[in-house]
Image (tube, helix red, strand yellow):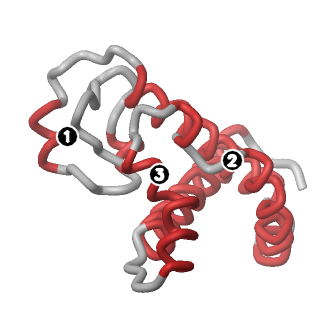
Amino acid sequence: MELTVPQVALVMAVGIFTWTMLEYTMHHSLFHIKTNNYWGNTIHYLLHGCHHKHPMDGLHLFFPPAVTAILLVPVWNLTKFIATPTAPGIFGGSLLGYVVYNVTHCYLHHGQPTVWITPMASKLNGTSGIDWFLLPGLYNLGSNHLL
């Protein structure tokens, strides 16, 4: 199936949106789950808690690529099952979304962005998926932790 340039752009946008929704869902339902026992607390800390405890630690800024690669197998199969002709484009858009999200997230933690975004950022504090509403280079987290 040959796609036109606008169709490719649309399919890639669907992939980016898919990644955004997947990240948002995982972040709120898995990474911020309330735990009440030792093992639950330990697993939560290892998955995501250390990121919030030490937001400037560059080793804990995003989901490890090796784990992501393993999880991509079922995501690819599901994408292929649901949208066979456009699966490569949607999957590619999702990967692009993953990379852009992580680069932006790292930059928000370690870059030297300008400060005009501060009022909006403080209003949205704690909202996952915000990276898509911020252009890279807008807000220095410092002691504030947006994501």
**Relative image position of residue 47 (x, y in whole percent):** 57, 60
Residue at 52% across, 40% down: 61
> Disc 2 residue type?
Pro
Q: Is residue 79 above or below residue 36?
A: above
Give how far across and how far down residue 119 sits, in percent.
9, 36
The picture quadrant where one finds residue 146 is top left
Question: Element at badge 1?
Answer: helix
* Residue identifier under label 1: 121
| Mark before the other along the chain sequence, 1 or 2 | 2
Of residues 38 and 138, which is closer to you in this image? 38
Residue 83 in which image quadrant: bottom right
The residue that mark 2 highlights is 64
Instruction: Return the residue found at the far front.
Output: 38
Q: Nearer the viewer, mark 3 or mark 1?
A: 3
Q: How many numbered marks appear?
A: 3
Residue, disc 3: 50
Name the residue type under label 1: Ala
Q: Closer to the camera, 147 or 119?
A: 147
**Is tag 3's residue or tag 1's residue first in the polypeptide sequence?**
3
